Amino acid sequence: MIVVLGYRYCVLISVPTLHDRPQDFDWLFATRNQIEKRKLITFEFSSCAFLGESAVTFLGGLAREIEYARGYCDIQMEQPSAWGSKKSL
């Protein structure tokens, strides 16, 4: 899901679980096309359970492309509650 925040090209992208399926590549390319001229991008991963290698590579390249175009890219990750309880070894 892509949400435009305000009028200044600020975009919040909620990244879903992405494997290496054709529909996952469709989502990646559609997302890239929709944020082409945006300068402030936030990727949020709260609804993502898994990212395939291709998705990691694609999103990393997309973030670098945004920064190269003098934009800003932020990553927000929510930590699952199961990770919060660490046991000392």
Image (cartoon, grey):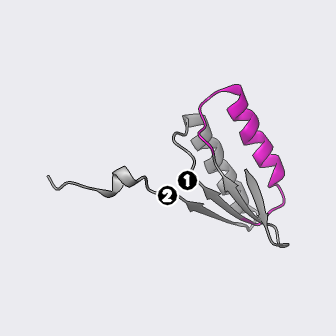
> What residue is drawn where x is 57% and y is 52%?
45
Choose between 88 and 20: the one closer to the eye.
Answer: 88
Q: Residue furthest left?
A: 89
Q: Which quarter of the picture shows residue 88?
A: bottom left
Q: Is residue 12 magenta?
A: no
> What residue is drawn where x is 81% and y is 67%?
9
How many tags in the picture? 2
Mark drawn on residue 88: none
Spot occupied by residue 64 in the image (x, y as percentages of width and height): 66, 56
Residue contact between numbered discs 2 and 1, judged by CB atoms under 8 Å? yes
Above or below, comparing residue 48 to residue 13 in the picture: above
Q: Is residue 35 magenta?
A: yes
Callout 2: few (<14), some (14-19), or many (20+) C-alpha neighbours within 10 Å? few
Q: Which residues are magenta?
A: 16-40
Left or right, residue 65 beside residue 74: right
Amino acid beneath label 1: Ser
Name the residue that disc number 2 marks. Answer: 78
Spot occupied by residue 30 in the image (x, y as percentages of width and height): 80, 42
Callout 1: few (<14), some (14-19), or many (20+) C-alpha neighbours within 10 Å? some
Name the residue that disc number 1 marks. Answer: 46
Q: Reading the chain from its start, which is encountered first: label 2 or label 1? A: 1
Spot occupied by residue 87 in the image (x, y as percentages of width and height): 20, 54
Amino acid beneath label 2: Glu
Above or below, comparing residue 80 to residue 56 in the picture: below
> What residue is drawn where x is 65% and y is 26%?
21
Q: Is disc 2 placed on a helix, strand or loop?
A: loop
Q: Is disc 1 placed on a helix, strand or loop?
A: loop
- Work out how far the residue at label 2 is from the one at label 1, CA to CA, in angstroms: 5 Å
Q: Residue furthest front?
A: 81
Left or right, residue 25 beside residue 7: left
Choose between 73 and 79: the one closer to the eye.
Answer: 79
